Amino acid sequence: MDKKINTAIRYKQLLNHKVSVREIIFILLFVLCLTPFVSAPLALLLGIIVAQWIGHPFLAVNHRATQILLQISVVGLGFGMNIDTAIQTGKQGFVLTVISILGTLSLGYLLGRLLKLEKVTAYLISVGTAICGGSAIAAVSPTIKANEKQVSVALATIFVLNAIALFVFAVVGHLLDLSQTQFGLWCAVAIQDTSSVVGAASKYGNEALQVATTVKLTTALWIIPIACLSAVAFKT
Protein backbone atom coordinates (compact mmCIF):
# COMPACT_ATOMS: atom_id res chain seq x y z
CA MET A 1 0.00 0.00 0.00
CA ASP A 2 2.79 2.40 0.97
CA LYS A 3 4.57 1.60 -2.27
CA LYS A 4 1.50 2.56 -4.31
CA ILE A 5 1.14 5.80 -2.36
CA ASN A 6 4.80 6.69 -2.93
CA THR A 7 4.44 5.94 -6.64
CA ALA A 8 1.36 8.15 -6.86
CA ILE A 9 3.20 10.96 -5.09
CA ARG A 10 6.11 10.70 -7.52
CA TYR A 11 3.78 10.85 -10.52
CA LYS A 12 2.04 13.88 -9.05
CA GLN A 13 5.37 15.62 -8.46
CA LEU A 14 6.39 14.82 -12.03
CA LEU A 15 3.19 16.27 -13.45
CA ASN A 16 3.54 19.42 -11.34
CA HIS A 17 7.20 19.85 -12.22
CA LYS A 18 8.00 23.03 -14.11
CA VAL A 19 10.78 22.78 -16.66
CA SER A 20 13.59 25.20 -15.85
CA VAL A 21 15.74 27.13 -18.31
CA ARG A 22 18.82 25.07 -17.52
CA GLU A 23 16.89 21.86 -18.14
CA ILE A 24 15.82 23.17 -21.55
CA ILE A 25 19.42 24.14 -22.39
CA PHE A 26 20.68 20.75 -21.26
CA ILE A 27 18.09 18.82 -23.30
CA LEU A 28 18.74 20.88 -26.43
CA LEU A 29 22.49 20.34 -26.18
CA PHE A 30 21.93 16.65 -25.48
CA VAL A 31 19.88 16.27 -28.66
CA LEU A 32 22.47 18.28 -30.60
CA CYS A 33 25.25 15.97 -29.42
CA LEU A 34 23.33 12.99 -30.79
CA THR A 35 23.58 14.41 -34.29
CA PRO A 36 26.57 13.80 -36.59
CA PHE A 37 27.37 17.52 -36.51
CA VAL A 38 28.97 17.31 -33.05
CA SER A 39 32.14 15.25 -32.61
CA ALA A 40 33.03 13.44 -29.38
CA PRO A 41 35.65 16.02 -28.28
CA LEU A 42 33.22 18.88 -28.94
CA ALA A 43 30.49 17.06 -27.00
CA LEU A 44 32.90 16.65 -24.09
CA LEU A 45 33.82 20.32 -24.23
CA LEU A 46 30.15 21.34 -24.26
CA GLY A 47 29.52 19.07 -21.29
CA ILE A 48 32.33 20.67 -19.30
CA ILE A 49 31.08 24.17 -20.13
CA VAL A 50 27.50 23.33 -19.17
CA ALA A 51 28.59 21.65 -15.93
CA GLN A 52 30.57 24.74 -14.91
CA TRP A 53 28.04 27.27 -16.16
CA ILE A 54 24.60 25.97 -15.19
CA GLY A 55 25.31 22.63 -13.52
CA HIS A 56 23.80 19.24 -14.31
CA PRO A 57 20.00 19.44 -13.89
CA PHE A 58 19.57 15.65 -13.95
CA LEU A 59 22.48 14.63 -11.76
CA ALA A 60 20.42 12.03 -9.89
CA VAL A 61 19.96 9.90 -13.01
CA ASN A 62 23.29 10.72 -14.66
CA HIS A 63 25.18 7.55 -13.72
CA ARG A 64 22.43 5.16 -14.75
CA ALA A 65 21.72 7.04 -17.97
CA THR A 66 25.41 7.01 -18.89
CA GLN A 67 25.59 3.25 -18.44
CA ILE A 68 22.52 2.67 -20.60
CA LEU A 69 23.71 4.98 -23.38
CA LEU A 70 27.14 3.34 -23.43
CA GLN A 71 25.59 -0.13 -23.62
CA ILE A 72 23.31 0.95 -26.48
CA SER A 73 26.27 2.50 -28.30
CA VAL A 74 28.37 -0.65 -27.99
CA VAL A 75 25.50 -2.82 -29.23
CA GLY A 76 24.98 -0.43 -32.13
CA LEU A 77 28.65 -0.67 -33.04
CA GLY A 78 28.35 -4.45 -32.98
CA PHE A 79 25.73 -4.35 -35.74
CA GLY A 80 28.22 -2.64 -38.02
CA MET A 81 31.07 -5.08 -37.44
CA ASN A 82 32.20 -7.88 -39.69
CA ILE A 83 32.43 -11.03 -37.55
CA ASP A 84 35.48 -12.42 -39.37
CA THR A 85 37.31 -9.13 -38.98
CA ALA A 86 36.35 -8.94 -35.32
CA ILE A 87 37.65 -12.45 -34.60
CA GLN A 88 40.91 -11.80 -36.44
CA THR A 89 41.39 -8.49 -34.67
CA GLY A 90 40.66 -10.11 -31.32
CA LYS A 91 43.36 -12.70 -31.94
CA GLN A 92 45.88 -10.06 -32.92
CA GLY A 93 45.05 -7.87 -29.96
CA PHE A 94 45.00 -10.59 -27.30
CA VAL A 95 48.75 -10.77 -26.73
CA LEU A 96 49.02 -6.99 -26.89
CA THR A 97 46.21 -6.72 -24.34
CA VAL A 98 47.89 -9.09 -21.88
CA ILE A 99 51.24 -7.33 -22.23
CA SER A 100 49.69 -3.89 -21.84
CA ILE A 101 47.70 -4.85 -18.73
CA LEU A 102 50.67 -6.44 -16.98
CA GLY A 103 52.97 -3.63 -18.08
CA THR A 104 50.58 -0.89 -16.95
CA LEU A 105 49.99 -2.48 -13.55
CA SER A 106 53.73 -2.92 -13.02
CA LEU A 107 54.54 0.61 -14.15
CA GLY A 108 51.70 1.98 -12.02
CA TYR A 109 53.09 0.21 -8.96
CA LEU A 110 56.57 1.61 -9.56
CA LEU A 111 55.31 5.14 -10.20
CA GLY A 112 53.13 4.96 -7.11
CA ARG A 113 56.14 4.06 -5.00
CA LEU A 114 58.30 6.68 -6.69
CA LEU A 115 55.75 9.46 -6.24
CA LYS A 116 54.85 8.20 -2.74
CA LEU A 117 51.17 7.92 -3.58
CA GLU A 118 48.73 6.21 -1.27
CA LYS A 119 48.79 2.49 -2.13
CA VAL A 120 45.09 1.97 -2.81
CA THR A 121 44.71 5.16 -4.86
CA ALA A 122 47.75 4.32 -6.98
CA TYR A 123 46.42 0.82 -7.57
CA LEU A 124 42.98 2.04 -8.61
CA ILE A 125 44.51 4.48 -11.10
CA SER A 126 46.69 1.68 -12.47
CA VAL A 127 43.73 -0.69 -12.83
CA GLY A 128 41.62 1.99 -14.48
CA THR A 129 44.42 2.79 -16.90
CA ALA A 130 45.16 -0.85 -17.65
CA ILE A 131 41.65 -2.10 -18.33
CA CYS A 132 38.68 0.16 -18.95
CA GLY A 133 38.72 3.23 -16.79
CA GLY A 134 35.83 3.95 -14.47
CA SER A 135 34.23 0.53 -14.92
CA ALA A 136 37.37 -1.22 -13.72
CA ILE A 137 37.73 1.16 -10.78
CA ALA A 138 34.10 0.60 -9.82
CA ALA A 139 34.55 -3.17 -9.97
CA VAL A 140 37.85 -3.35 -8.12
CA SER A 141 37.30 -0.71 -5.42
CA PRO A 142 34.91 -2.81 -3.27
CA THR A 143 37.24 -5.82 -3.39
CA ILE A 144 40.14 -3.83 -1.92
CA LYS A 145 37.89 -1.80 0.42
CA ALA A 146 38.75 1.56 -1.10
CA ASN A 147 37.12 4.58 0.52
CA GLU A 148 35.18 7.31 -1.28
CA LYS A 149 38.11 9.71 -1.44
CA GLN A 150 40.41 7.13 -3.01
CA VAL A 151 37.81 6.19 -5.61
CA SER A 152 37.09 9.85 -6.40
CA VAL A 153 40.76 10.68 -6.94
CA ALA A 154 41.21 7.67 -9.21
CA LEU A 155 38.10 8.47 -11.25
CA ALA A 156 39.08 12.13 -11.60
CA THR A 157 42.54 11.14 -12.84
CA ILE A 158 41.10 8.77 -15.41
CA PHE A 159 38.57 11.38 -16.55
CA VAL A 160 41.32 13.93 -17.19
CA LEU A 161 43.39 11.41 -19.14
CA ASN A 162 40.36 10.42 -21.23
CA ALA A 163 39.55 14.04 -21.97
CA ILE A 164 43.10 14.70 -23.16
CA ALA A 165 43.05 11.55 -25.29
CA LEU A 166 39.88 12.61 -27.10
CA PHE A 167 41.54 15.79 -28.31
CA VAL A 168 45.10 14.57 -28.83
CA PHE A 169 45.08 11.00 -30.14
CA ALA A 170 43.71 11.60 -33.64
CA VAL A 171 46.15 14.47 -34.18
CA VAL A 172 49.12 12.38 -33.06
CA GLY A 173 47.91 9.46 -35.16
CA HIS A 174 47.92 11.57 -38.30
CA LEU A 175 51.31 13.06 -37.45
CA LEU A 176 52.77 9.56 -37.07
CA ASP A 177 50.92 8.41 -40.20
CA LEU A 178 49.45 5.41 -38.39
CA SER A 179 47.29 2.99 -40.34
CA GLN A 180 43.67 2.39 -39.34
CA THR A 181 44.60 -0.88 -37.62
CA GLN A 182 47.59 0.61 -35.82
CA PHE A 183 45.57 3.54 -34.56
CA GLY A 184 42.71 1.30 -33.45
CA LEU A 185 45.07 -0.92 -31.46
CA TRP A 186 46.76 2.11 -29.95
CA CYS A 187 43.44 3.61 -28.88
CA ALA A 188 42.24 0.36 -27.33
CA VAL A 189 45.41 -0.12 -25.33
CA ALA A 190 46.23 3.46 -24.37
CA ILE A 191 42.82 5.04 -23.68
CA GLN A 192 40.96 4.01 -20.56
CA ASP A 193 37.17 4.23 -20.92
CA THR A 194 35.36 2.46 -23.75
CA SER A 195 33.37 5.60 -24.54
CA SER A 196 36.57 7.61 -25.00
CA VAL A 197 38.07 4.86 -27.15
CA VAL A 198 35.01 5.01 -29.40
CA GLY A 199 35.15 8.79 -29.54
CA ALA A 200 38.83 8.98 -30.44
CA ALA A 201 38.79 6.08 -32.92
CA SER A 202 35.67 7.31 -34.71
CA LYS A 203 37.53 10.51 -35.62
CA TYR A 204 40.21 8.46 -37.36
CA GLY A 205 38.06 6.14 -39.46
CA ASN A 206 35.56 3.29 -39.47
CA GLU A 207 38.21 0.57 -39.60
CA ALA A 208 40.06 2.11 -36.67
CA LEU A 209 36.77 2.24 -34.78
CA GLN A 210 36.06 -1.45 -35.37
CA VAL A 211 39.56 -2.49 -34.33
CA ALA A 212 39.57 -0.28 -31.25
CA THR A 213 36.13 -1.39 -30.09
CA THR A 214 36.86 -5.09 -30.56
CA VAL A 215 40.16 -4.99 -28.69
CA LYS A 216 38.76 -2.75 -25.94
CA LEU A 217 35.83 -5.07 -25.31
CA THR A 218 38.31 -7.95 -25.12
CA THR A 219 40.31 -5.96 -22.58
CA ALA A 220 37.18 -5.33 -20.52
CA LEU A 221 36.81 -9.08 -19.96
CA TRP A 222 39.82 -8.87 -17.68
CA ILE A 223 37.85 -6.90 -15.08
CA ILE A 224 36.60 -10.03 -13.30
CA PRO A 225 39.94 -11.87 -12.94
CA ILE A 226 41.73 -8.65 -11.97
CA ALA A 227 39.06 -7.89 -9.36
CA CYS A 228 39.43 -11.38 -7.88
CA LEU A 229 43.22 -11.19 -7.85
CA SER A 230 43.05 -7.73 -6.29
CA ALA A 231 40.92 -9.02 -3.44
CA VAL A 232 43.46 -11.74 -2.72
CA ALA A 233 46.46 -9.41 -3.06
CA PHE A 234 45.09 -6.78 -0.67
CA LYS A 235 44.17 -9.36 1.95
CA THR A 236 47.77 -10.44 2.31
Image (cartoon, helix red, strand yellow):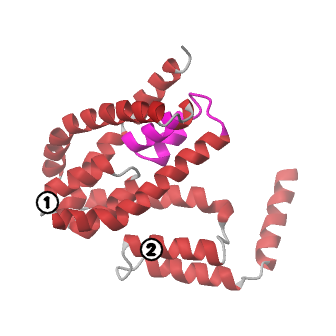
Which residue in the structure is indicated by mark 2?
A: 43
Quadrant of the rendered structure where residue 179 is?
bottom left
Q: Which residue is mark 1?
A: 178
Splitting the image into 4 quarters, where does residue 161 fall? Answer: bottom left
From this view, report whether residue 22 is shown above or below residue 233.
Answer: below
Where in the figure is residue 209, as x and y percent of width and height? 24, 60
Where is residue 184 drawn, in percent x and y? 22, 55
Please tell me which residue is depicted at 53% across the width and 49% down the height of the picture.
155
Where 106 sits versus 157, above or below?
above
Query: What secondary structure is found at the residue carrying circle 2?
Result: helix
Q: Is residue 114 left or right of residue 146?
A: left
Pair 1/2: label in front:
1
- Could you tell me which residue is drawn at 79 percent across and 60 percent down? 7
Choose between 25 and 173: the one closer to the eye: 173
Instruction: Locate residue 86, reporting x and y percent.
Output: 19, 49
- Compare marks 1 and 2 and give the one earlier in the sequence: 2
Q: Residue at x 58, y 76 (%)?
A: 50
